[in-house]
Image: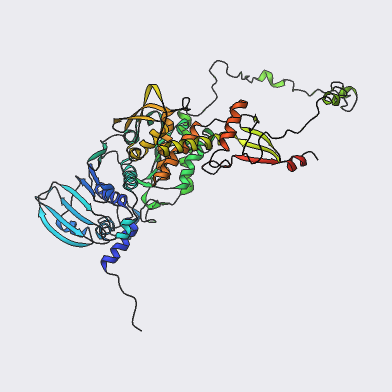
Amino acid sequence: MSDIIRLLPDSIANQIAAGEVIQRPASVVKELIENSIDAGADFIQLIIKDAGRSLIQVIDNGEGMSETDARMAFERHATSKIQAVDDLFALRTMGFRGEALASIAAVAQVELKTARKEDPTGTLIQISASQVERQETIAVNPGSIFSVKNLFFNVPARRKFLKSNETELRNIITEFERIVLVHSQITFELRHNDAEIFNLPVSTPRQRILNVFGKRLNTQLLTLQAGTSLVSVSGFVGTPDSSKKKGTLQFFFVNNRFMRHPYFHKAVTQAFEPFIPAGEMPNYFVYLTVDPASIDVNIHPAKTEIKFENEQAIWLIINSAVKESLAKSNAIPGIEFNREGAMDMPVYTHKQADAEAPKVRFHSDYNPFTEKAHSSVPKNWEKLYEDQPFVPEEPAMPAEWTEGRATGFSFKGKYLITSLKSGLLIIDQHRAHIRVLYDGYLQQINQKRGISQGLLFPEIISFTPKEATILPYLLDDLAYIGFDLSDLGNNAYSINGIPGGLENTDIIETLQDMTDKVLETGCEVKEEISESLALTLAKKAAIPYGKFLSEEEAESLIAKLFASSGPNYTPDGKSILSILGEDEIGKRFK
């Protein structure tokens, strides 16, 4: 039998490596921009076409490369960052493995133009599927221009599994945000299909956050600062009143590198728990600086998961820093002793040392079982009800809810209770209204008819560049629901009309929640986007808990609920109905 183990050809080995490092266009963007940062650039321009399928181009004014270095950069494991094993534990640069360019060149057509400041000419290299097709001397400005064309052209299976252009563009913007937020000393530009998405000048870290996510955050950011010999913590956390259930901005960085860290995330959120509603999350931008020898960034191909040597101690420092930030900013309630009407706190003095302790006084001759003790209870109380015999109410609507009229009463403004032949039916009125509204909004979208109530004073809403990528797919559905929006340019819209029933809601927050929900779920199918919009709006417009309904309102809601497509559950699977059977009721009186 012949030998069966063979060395892989470089072309196949590079494609396997590319599968780990280059998963989608956003992966290419990350690697190329990080190379530009490591090259000392203070200006980086990213140009994208067709969400990275056709072109990903990064232009920088960094150090550039010599002719030899330009050729070597595309070899596997070629790197300027590591000379010895110990260098792995003292890294302060972004890239270091020497896999990125080789991996990109294995699955795309790559062109590099580069020059150093001290060289009179530069170098042009063109590579396709790991094969060098052209190398020559050219005139080019100092720095580098990487152009990656036709990504995955030679791996059709990988290209087929790319998501829609909108989804891939959002992923690119996500990677771009993670980089620019921690490098505010660099000017960044991002253009997609010749349209400018970001133009970020050199700024402070706080201003960079506002430039990326909008000026509305300006009043919601609290400064975070703590320094110890173990770790330096800086950045910003959101005020408690800016917390929300969807679309929160949560970023951790360590030594200028984005990371995911569920354990440290808990350190931040636990500090907020007493001050925000259950289920809501705070915004945060936390920057950690530690000794590189105390972390390991080489545990994941994307280098977003990092192992720390002293995780528990750092957790406590982060948690304490967040609590201190909340306390110093007066963002949390405290006891105010100087305001009018504050509590009178007695002052202790030595003269009061012999004050008499309070004594308990009681009637020793009191007997609760004597006739006197019961004198306040009316005698023969059972006769009060002799003329009012109890007759179980028959339901006005049969259990099958096919005809008739439902009657019931509201319990604590939360539940509607009505009788059935088999017992009592309890309806969660808020969830019932969500189901009714959801079906109505979805019908309006499907039938392309929406009724809008004009606003006397239109409001202005501004979207982030990432949110703006999905707006073309939401505007029609929003119009069918009843929103009348006008494009003002620069991702800003005028709200001229709204659906009926939203008069007492925060319209900007409602639209923000709707876009956040679509972004979070990453809906690809038009039907799923419509359902997401309808559900989010229904939750906003539904009857709040605590509102008591009149008999007519309760009857109308019950009738509409049982005429809906699914009266038992809300669209997101929460129970609407509960039946308390006659047998169960009887057990309570045994």
Residue 223 seen in this snapshot: no
Residue 416 seen in this snapshot: yes
Quadrant where the C terminus is found in the figure: top right
Quadrant where the N terminus is found in the figure: bottom left
Q: Position of residue 428 (x, y in %)?
A: 60, 36
Rendered image quadrant of residue 60: top left
Q: 287 or 480, which is in the foreground? A: 480
Q: 30 or 24, which is in the foreground? A: 24
Q: Position of residue 366 (x, y in %)?
A: 87, 24
The residue positioned 29% from the left and 62% from the top of the image is 15
The colour scheme is rainbow
Q: Is residue 443 left or right of residue 212?
A: right
Residue reaching furthest to the bottom: 1
Q: 565 or 95, which is in the foreground? A: 565
- Check the image and report above or below for 398 versus 157: above
Q: Is residue 451 left or right of residue 582?
A: left
Rendered image quadrant of residue 329: top left
Q: Is residue 383 left or right of residue 69?
A: right
Residue reaching furthest to the front: 403
- Check the image and report above or below for 351 versus 415: above
Q: 382 or 82, which is in the foreground? A: 382
Q: Position of residue 368 (x, y in %)?
A: 86, 27
